[in-house]
Amino acid sequence: MTSTDDRIATDDALVKRVAHLQNAMHKLGADVIRLQTQLTDLAATAPQPADESGKATPFIFNMSRDAYKGELAALVAWVNDFLVPVYVGDNATWCPVWWEHHEAVGRLHALRLAYDELTDTAASGASGPGIWHRDHLDPVLARLCAESGPFAACLTAAGHVERRRVETA
């Protein structure tokens, strides 16, 4: 083989590799759309978290599996429809599949519970929304979007990375 033949063979392998990666990317994109659709459908059918009996909503990690699924769907709707457009915007450190990070789910659920309580000015007073911003929203967004936060590795070349606890033997 001549050096030209080597280049052609390498170029052909590169073209095949690029095509393979493009197919994988399209499949992942389809998976993301499917998961978002499922979460939207769950949110539409989930019972509203407001309990007419006056009982407080339990923290998401203290719920049964079925209650967790419904609460997560409602949380996804609240975060994606309200929190992200209003407060996060085009922040480059926000993970597009944030619900796969347990830390994010816990912090965002706590944030929503505080929001429900503190934005009801009849119950919390006129300063409730300001307290929510200062004591809840700002620290949660700072932690989630921090360089050492749960989303830190998601926007690298590797893409979304779910942090998992290290299994001990």
Image (spheres, helix red, strand yellow):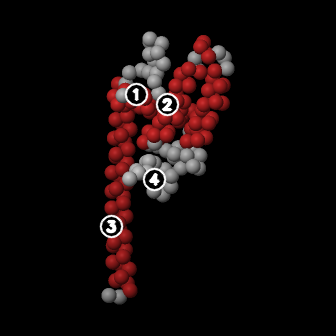
Residue appearing at x 43%, y 29% in the figure: 62
Contact, mark 2 vs mark 1 (Cβ under 8 Å) = no
Mark toward the viewer: 2 or 3? 2
SS at circle 1: loop
Task: Give the position of the N terminus as an image quadrant.
Answer: bottom left
SS at circle 4: loop
Regarding residue 96, the answer to whether it shows in the image is: yes
Density class for disc 2 (Cα within 10 Å; few <14, some 14-19, many ≥20) is: many
Amino acid of disc 2: His
**Residue to which mark 3 is pinned:** 16
Mark toward the viewer: 2 or 1? 1
State which tag comes first along the sequence, 1 or 4.
Answer: 1
**Residue to which mark 1 is pinned:** 63
**Residue to which mark 4 is pinned:** 159
**Residue to which mark 2 is pinned:** 109
Density class for disc 3 (Cα within 10 Å; few <14, some 14-19, many ≥20) is: few
Which quadrant of the structure image shows residue 49?
top left
State which tag comes first along the sequence, 4 or 2.
Answer: 2
Amino acid of disc 4: Gly
Kindly report the distance in space between the C-alpha atoms of the residues bearing marks 2 and 1.
Answer: 12 Å
Amino acid of disc 3: Lys
Density class for disc 1 (Cα within 10 Å; few <14, some 14-19, many ≥20) is: some
Amino acid of disc 1: Met
Contact, mark 4 vs mark 2 (Cβ under 8 Å) = no
Q: Is residue 143 above or below residue 24?
A: above
SS at circle 2: helix
Q: Is residue 98 left or right of residue 28?
A: right
